[in-house]
Amino acid sequence: MPLSVRVSLAAQRTIRDAFRDLERTVSEKDRAGFASTTLDCVIKAAHDVEDQLAARQLLRNMRRLEPLFTGLQYYSKSIELLCNGTPYLPWIWAPIKLILKVASDFVEAFEKIITAYARIAEPLARFKIFDQTYSSNVEIQQTLAIFYSDILKFHKEAYKFVRRSGWSVLFMTSWGRFQRRFDSVIEDLKTHEDLVDKTANAVGISDSRRMREELAVLRRETLERVAKEEEERTAAQYVAIVGWLRMDDSEQAKLFESVMTEPRKYTETCDWILNQDKIVAWMRCSQESAFLVLHGNPGTGKSVLATRIATFLQATGKSLIISHICTYSQVTTTEYDQILRSILLQLVRSDTDLVAYIYEEFILKKKSVTVQAIERLIRETIGAISDNPAQTKYVHIVLDGLDECDKDKQLKIINLLERMVSAALASTSVVCKVLMTTCMPASVAKKLKQKHMVSLSAEKEALRKAITLYSAQRLAQSRSRWHQMGINDVELKDLETRLARKADGMFLWARLVLEYLSTNMFVRKSEVMGAVEMLPRELRTLAHNFFSYGQILTQLISHFDNRSVARLQSILGWIAFAKRPLRRAEMRSALSFLPEEENFHVQELAPNYMFDIVAHEQGLVIASCLLSGLQVFRPSYPEQERPLRVLKGFHGLHVYASEFWVEYLLLTAASEKGLDTSSKFFARSTQLATDLNSLRQVEDPPLDTKTLDSRLVHLESHSEVFRAARSILAERAARIDQDTSVPLPEQLEARLCEVTDLRTLLSNYQHTVQALLQLWKFPRFGVQEFEKFKRDFCSTAFTCRFSGCPLASTGFQSKALRDKHELSHAPRVPCDVPDCRYPGPFPSTQALRNHKLKHHNQGMRNIKIKVPPDLRRKKLVPTALERSGKESGHRGTDQSRFDIASEKPQSIPATDTSLELVAPNLGQADGIRLSEFSLNDDFFSIPNWDRLSHIDDLDISNRLKTLEPHVTATDNDDEGPANVARTEDVHEPVEPEVPTTTTIIPPAKNEVNSSMQLERHSGICIQGCNR
């Protein structure tokens, strides 16, 4: 009895794995006849295809496949022993019949596939001389099994290539990748061909085993090398596609993570949606519910639910998940072309063939990125997304926030998704399903209602349970805090229930309440338990305005109570509508005068009337600030309290209020609603106007309608307010109309003055600030706080004193900068002399006179000296000038005259014993000391000014020729004349066209050395001024 033939178990396992791999790839319909297909059937099918191509005038040489068929016939005899009792054997030739029939419809692909199959014939030719007896060798059986595996792998790649949806479109770009895989299989067959030869030639068993092991290593390394090369090539191509699309997919990833942050921290709060019937049907891998709409009111958590569904599907790994979130916070996410790019990028990311196709067809050919091109690419790729024809590929698309896109784009987005679903169904191997979340905008409601829908309004019970669970987890984080306040677990449970019930399905409202509880400081138990009722129910009715994805505003107010929200609204109002930007110190002052309003919530604002509300509130603050200033900055107010209030910043808004109170009155009165006489703003303004009118010491200036504001007519019915506003505007207009707008005199800033109007009130405020700025420290006030006060308020102390200047309310850092700026307000006067080389204009009339004196020989001829009456009968004799009279060539001996003034002059410093002529417009310097002139003998005999009592209108014009410098001595100059008087030579004779007045200011009695003889020391100084 013959012994049974040994069969290698390892060889059988290799054949079985290769068979099952190919069986999973080929569809059930295509493999139905494989078991009964013989090699003759395949040969006959090849001839039939050849005839069909010839009939289409596309004849191809099919004789190239004869060596393949011959090699397969011999190989089948060698492997028959390993395939006994199995359906494995026909699979080495049956797929060829199917592949030839499918590929014949596309001749270019058919030609390349025939060429590739013909290459398999060469390694199979060895089996023609292969002795059947070697098939029972275990070592040879393992080599034969590897041949079987490589042949089936070749069939698998070819079948996937021709059975893929849209394979004819992808052929030219994908063939290169398949070609590399075919080459790898052919190379592997050739290496094992040598192993068969050596084994058949009775090579030693040990040598054949070693050779087989080396080939296995080589085969594995080859496969790894090919896979790595494909991976690197695909990655580079994908990066090029991202650049071509100009798409940053990290933006969507960040949005997705931000939405999922809260659900991940508080698990199971969103899991109820995974058990909803219609959602379950949509998530199922079937063609059921291809288009589903999830809709609900703002704040119900649609985005969170959508992302939870997407993450659940991603975890299952049964389908390709494409998600896109549209949000107002990032405008690009709502743009139609960006949505297209996002979908396309996620589609091609999962398939290397699609990456290669787009790279070669669009990037290498330098095609531009257009909406039409991307739409066409999406339709093509969605049908070709499946790389396994035997298995259906499922694509789940989740689009969140349709209502946040432009209305004219919403319908286009819906149409795009519908076309994707249709294109996938047409491919027979891809199923595309869409989930869209929206608030159901009216523009697309009719179209969306034709789809399967899930309404969150009908899921109130599920939402209530979810909110209760969410509240329990949030409150549990601060359980020790609640217990310290005497709140037990039963009461916390009651709080959770009441919160969920009042939320009424609005997840975002519940989150706001819980944020309030976790961030605010509570002392009493009732404050916590009453928090649910404290937030008004209007939040739910105004959810669209308050919660409609206003993420920035939500983050700002989520930690605030009602008082904080009202103050935030006021801050934003000052920032948006103040007449000029406020400094931080001014803002703090404004907030200190805020009235406490009940039920004053940020969501009650409406864009159409927001400014009127803000104007009333700011006007009320300004009037309150000025009323407070009227009390504090009067001289009668306690000196100890006034600086402390200023240091604390209570009056930091005073400069702004002084400048714009009338403007707020006029703005409100001229508005559509007019000045509300029942408002606090009107009441405070009336009180302020009454106080100002009572303090006014002079009659109102005459009105000039051209300079007053036309809006004043709206205040005529309110006498006190009208009178105050008219006086302020008239006073400002009068100063503007002057040739030089004279600022507040410096002496008013030196001390507090009696308050008569807003200007003097402002002066007192600035005087207080200036006095504080000169100190190093202040009692009862910290050093750091005092330094901060100086930084914040130094500019309020030095504002421009010219009405109408923009810097009248902003100020300067120092007095010097303020004074330098005020020089720019001087009038600009041009020179009126024809053909003047330097016509100006000049900043003042004084500068013009100096210019004429220097360049046009024009100046002052008549100089009058006003002296006290007791000097009028004495005559001044210019002895020093008399010596140079002839040289000066002065014209008109009787035209110039010094009149000594009747008023007794003010004293001058004791160190200067010279007489001082205060003459405006005689020189560019502030003080000009003319050359000395002397008095006659009668005048010299008078020892002091009291004896000069009978001098009358002395004429020295005939003697005034030139002025010479003179050195004068002082009382404290022990070594003789040491101080040289400041001089200014007048080189040009003066002209009679510009008469001026010059004053002699004699020294006081106690300031003149009685022993000093005026005959020897009679220096005269002329000092220019603008008085």
Image (cartoon, helix red, strand yellow):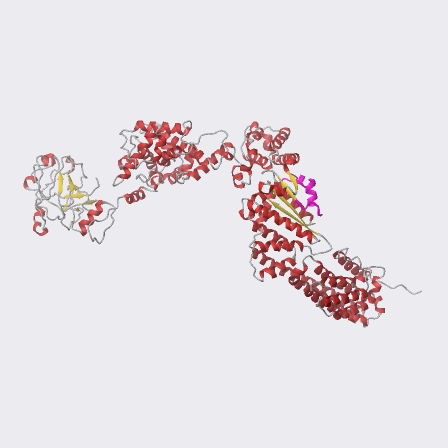
- The quadrant of the picture occupied by the C terminus is top left
Q: Quadrant of residue 820?
A: top left
Numbered-mark total: 0
Residue 378 sits above or below residue 793 on the image? below
- The quadrant of the picture occupied by the N terminus is bottom right
Residue 1020 sits above or below residue 676 on the image? below
Residue 152 sits above or below residue 131 on the image? above
747 and 294: which is toward the camera: 294
Please tell me whether residue 10 belongs to the stretch shown in magenta.
no
Residue 491 is situated, as x and y percent measured from the top left of the image, at 62, 28
582 and 210: which is toward the camera: 582
Would residue 530 be visible to someone looking at this image?
Answer: yes
* 745 relative to 93 in the view: left or right: left
Q: Residue furthest left?
A: 937
Residue 937 is situated, as x and y percent measured from the top left of the image, at 5, 41
Residue 712 is situated, as x and y percent measured from the top left of the image, at 34, 33
501 and 645: which is toward the camera: 501
Q: Quadrant of residue 697?
A: top left
Q: Quadrant of residue 13?
A: bottom right
Please tell me whether residue 267 belongs to the stretch shown in magenta.
yes
661 and 170: which is toward the camera: 170
Q: Residue furthest right?
A: 1
User: Residue at coordinates 47% horizontally, 29% vertically from top-left?
Assistant: 597
* 797 relative to 254 in the view: left or right: left
Which residues lie in the magenta part?
265-291
